[in-house]
Image (cartoon, coloured by chain):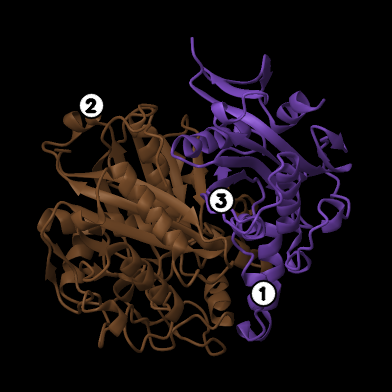
Amino acid sequence: MEGRGTTIGNVWLARSNTISALGESTEQLWQALHQGRSGITATWRFPTAHYVSSVAAAVPALEDAGQGGDQSSFEKLLDLLLDGFGPVPEHSLLLTATTKGKIDALEKRERGRPHREADLLPSATPATVARRLRMESAQAWNINAACASSTVGVAQAAARISAGRAEAAVIVGADLLSEFVFSGFSALQALSPAGCRPFDRARDGLTLGEGGVALLLVSDALHQKLVPRPRVRVAGWGVASDAHHITAPDREGLGLQQAVTGALTIAGRSVGELCAVCAHGTGTLYNDAMELTAFRALFGEPLPPVFSIKGAIGHTLGAAGGIEVAVAEQALLHGKIPPTARLQEADPAAGGSVSAGTVAIHGDHLLTTNSGFGGINAALVLSRGDDP
Amino acid sequence: MSPTLQAAICGAGWVSADGPGSPTGGAPFRVGPELLPRIRWRDILDTPNPRFGRLDDFSRAGVLAAAKALQNAAMAEWDGNKRYVGIIAGTHWGCLASDLDYYATAIPEHGALASPNRFAYTLPNCFLGEAAITFGLTGPGYVLNAGSAGPETGAAGAILEVALDWLALGCEAMLAGFCDVPPVTPPGPGAPVGAGFVVLRPPTDGPDAPTLALEGTTWQVGATTVRTWAELFAALRT
């Protein structure tokens, strides 16, 4: 797929924060990942006796949030994520990325508990985030692209900044651990009973997590003002659909391949220049197989180092891609990728590219990928430093 | 001054209070609080769609409108080779109706009876996936929700701008529109019920088609300023 060449300027990652089962900052998450830790444990958030799994990766501070009053726990998640994120540049775009937003409001409503009716609307999330960030004058939008939502948000923001139609953008991705979603994935038989093991030979499903991410993307001009030295750019982006199935990926990964090719085209890079891949890696039989098939088609043999963080923090749905961007940034800056947590014996199809330990990487460009319901696929190329 | 963004409008279609329509025929676009009339797949296209019967009401409205738009753009038929065409939709209610239908199956027996088929449609972008499967569309497909209250507040313009972003990034065409089907007991004031899409191509791909242009902060169809989907569809109606 040829891009039509509307990119002009660089798009820099100026700031990030993450909330997950392994910490209330990107730094905490990064340290925990390299310790090989996993936040997947038994969940007491709701009864699980009738579900195929009883484990999840919950944020400890959210365990009792929202139980007493009518406020959604999502507000507490945003508090943890955005308090201290800092001021954002004037006239920044604001994009949120959540698949179910304040879903606990719907759960409370249907069970006759106090809730806020306005929280049932999709507009509730972007409106709340806008208030939190004091960006009420901004037109805030939520992107719903299933589990690729925050990745698509980054792509959309990057396209605007690169084309000179925006100077900055804030992307806030977040999703709660909810019985609504847990029950659904259980009904689909998609949950791992004991906890996900991405790219493992014996993987048997995904594990849900909860979390949030806030990313500030800026233009070259703002970057020079905000950040002391060049760090990591969003160099390329691509989004494509499988047009195959609503809940299962195209086994050949054609949509993912198309998204990756699009991202590389915009970045002006070849697959050989990618030093690692932060994969979607949910731990389901089909997603991980699809990704490995797509990566082999793109890279040939051998694959570059591939990792997934979902064995560490679960699948955080709308937040997943954005959290992975924050981790990928750290990977480029530190020259190493974290272990793929909970990996015991890698799928032979991975060809030795996935590791249960930290792996040094050598290069300036890293690929992140995400896929989701509806057949959506999104890919980003992150690059360290200036464009040579 | 040259327009900031520009595209050719190669087709449009909608399902609204008086039924399906397009700029060249069928019912005019009229949205109100009343529910949509029952529309069958064969009211739009002769080609069978075996998936249509299993869709929830929100997805049906969206897929029907997309089908009508593609038909109007002479793109509904395809030869099996998928096309890098995307679809971006705005929605006020999202899939809330589908969420409530699904959760009603998850409450009894502590989730033992939760319906996987209903759960599959509890993301508002899934109907875009259905349209993608039916018509072989491999471009970006996702939903945007405005943060401000009200279904038409700046919504059309933002959706159109995103669609033009993707045209500039290499999509052959983009569908841009909206889909709104409220739940039976909506949480808040009534919103227009219906769905509609325009089919956009790069200006050079549709030299004889009406032109959509962003002039400063104002959207124009030819010489007509449009601010809402209703105004846009009316401007196309011949």
Left of B199 or right of it: where is A374? left
C-alpha separation, residue under disc 1 versus residue under disc 2: 49 Å
Q: Disc 1 designates what residue?
A: B117
> Please, which chain is the residue tagged with disc 1 on?
B
Marks 1 and 3, the one that precedes in the sequence: 3
- Is residue A287 shown to the viewer in this render? yes
Q: Chain A in the picture: what colour?
A: brown
Task: Name the residue type under label 1.
Answer: Asn
Q: Is the Cβ of the residue at disc 2 closer than 8 Å to that at disc 3?
A: no
Q: Please tell me if label 1 and label 2 are on a single chain.
A: no
In the depicted structure, whether residue A366 falls above or below residue A200: above
Residue A345, image x, y percentages? 25, 88
Seen at 57% across and 89% down, the residue is A50
Badge 3 crowding class, 10 Å Cα cut-off, few under 14, some 14 to 19, many 20 or more, is: some
Which residue is at a point 29% across and 69% down the rendered structure image?
A: A309
Q: Say if labels 1 and 3 share a chain.
A: yes
Image quadrant where one finds the C terminus of chain A = top left
Q: Is residue B79 left or right of residue A1?
A: right
Rendered image: mark on residue A221: 2
Label 2 neighbourhood size at 10 Å, few (<14), some (14-19), many (20+)? few
Real-space CA distance between mark 1 and mark 3, rounded to the nearest whole angstrom: 27 Å
Percent of width and height locating residue B219: 60, 22
Disc nearest the viewer among 1 and 3: 3
Q: Is residue B25 above or below residue B106?
A: above
Chain B display color: purple
Label 1: which secondary element = helix
The numbered disc on residue B83 is 3
| Amino acid at dot 2 | Ala
| Residue shown at 37% from the left, 85% from the top | A203
